[in-house]
Image (cartoon, rainbow, N blue to C red):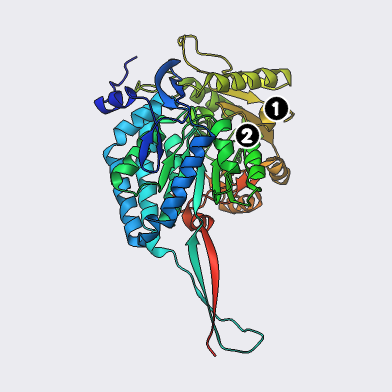
Amino acid sequence: MQQLELLPAVQAFLAQPGRLFIGGSWQDAASGRRFVVENPATEQALTEVAQGDERDVNAAVAAARAAFTGTWALQSPAQRGLLLFRLADLLDQHREELAQLITLENGKPIANARGEAASAANIIRYFAGWPTKIEGSTLPVSPASGAPMLNYTLREPVGVCALIVPWNFPLTMCVWKLGPALATGCVAVLKPAEQTPLIAIRLVQLIEAAGFPAGVVNLITGLGIDTGAPLAQHPDVDKIAFTGSTQVGRLIAQASTRNMKKVSLELGGKSPNIILPDADIARAAKGAADGIFYNQGQVCTAGSRLYVHASVLDQVLEELQRHAAAHVLGNGLDPATSMGPLVSARQLSTVQGYLQRGLEEGAELICGGGRPEHLERGHFIEPSVFLDRAERACVAREEIFGPVLTVMSWTEIDELVVRANDSPYGLAAGLWTRDLRSAHRVAAQLKAGSVWINCWNVVDPSSPFGGYKQSGWGREMGKNVIDAYTETKSVFVDLA
């Protein structure tokens, strides 16, 4: 296997320990402590990063507040947009460097990392157009007094935003949150996952290079209990945006009630993918395989429940086995690799536990289920497919966050919709069919924030993304997210 040679810029970046960015200054943690960032494909250390704690969080929030009431408040909408356009250009210029850092700390194949780096620039460029388009309205009011009144609304930035991002798409999730926060005039304290802090550090370096004023974006790296929890509880944080597990999302929502800060949550999923008998079976099976095996299954919208009409079940299972066997597992820096490792030893252990429990609870393992024999190191697991005829095993009910697909059969469409909706989650759903009437009818009945017809995992910065039920609160992207980072003020003027 042949690996890409790291760019000199990447080598130089890794040679220096990562630091916090507070009030426009790169600095060590107040404690002086650091933690090791590991390459999940080799289990070897990449570098060390500052391990922040509550003292650093307090300093970052104070710096953000000072910027919000000071230099940032003086920036015009056009100036904010210009800074975001500059950042998008820098992301484009450093695309390969960013992609290599993503692969090194996350493990995903370099082709996928390049796609993530490219999309980051496009997302920021989309939000760069928003600052000059955030507007209020004039309303025709009829006060009881009968006096002539002018009423208009203003959209104002929420304030200090704590942005807590996950490790599965470490750059994408940063820009999903930073883009609307900065476009609306908010300031930010960014907290990346401890597994993938390097790409966030490099992103903030580019934010600094773009010319954003000191304190507008602050970066805290560290463990969740030491930094994420203090951010959620902080009385001077006005909003928190979190992407991660439903379990942690509940804790953040509870902590945020101390000062009633605004909360956006993008949480877990156990998304149903449905194949109707009239579908293009080859295309549907490939879409189903891609929907669960992409990014090693570490995707909140992974199509981990596949409902296949009984008449085409055998054909689909055969196709799924073929797609699973075609994956090349290995180091993400090898261009031949199509599936990298899971992000950590802990995540590997979790997935292995589900594989064992699935068998114990009666699911039939069709393929996969083990570690690849040719890879001695790294957190690798084979792409796996279960058939669960009773739909009772944990692999059919619980979010696994790994390349594990559970297949169930169905015969009646109305019963199928009930089964597909029988989940505490509602992030996404998919449907494969040639019948547009069935497609639109079933899509309307599925309880999910995103429904994909004859496709999977299609996202765009202009389209809202979020979940029903325990998959979260609010929406990312599109004009919906602008509302999430602004307050509405109603102003009445007596014209008598």
Q: Foreground residue, 79 or 350?
A: 79
Spatial CA distance of label 1 from label 2 is 11 Å
> How far from the left and from the top, in percent, is residue 237?
54, 48
Q: Foreground residue, 421 or 139?
A: 139
* Residue drawn at 60 percent across, 51 percent down: 261
Q: Is residue 208 visible?
A: yes
* Residue drawn at 65 percent across, 22 percent down: 354
Q: How many residues crowd mark 2 within 10 Å: few (<14), some (14–19), many (20+)?
A: many
Q: Eyeballing the image, is 215 above or below 148?
A: above
* For marks 1 and 2 on the same chain, the one whose residue lies earlier in the sequence: 2
Residue occupied by mark 1: 394
Does 107 sit left or right of 76 as displayed? right
Residue occupied by mark 2: 305
Q: Foreground residue, 64 or 7?
A: 64
Does 293 sit left or right of 331 as displayed? right
| Secondary structure beneath label 2 | strand
Residue type at the position of mark 2: Arg
| Secondary structure beneath label 1 | helix
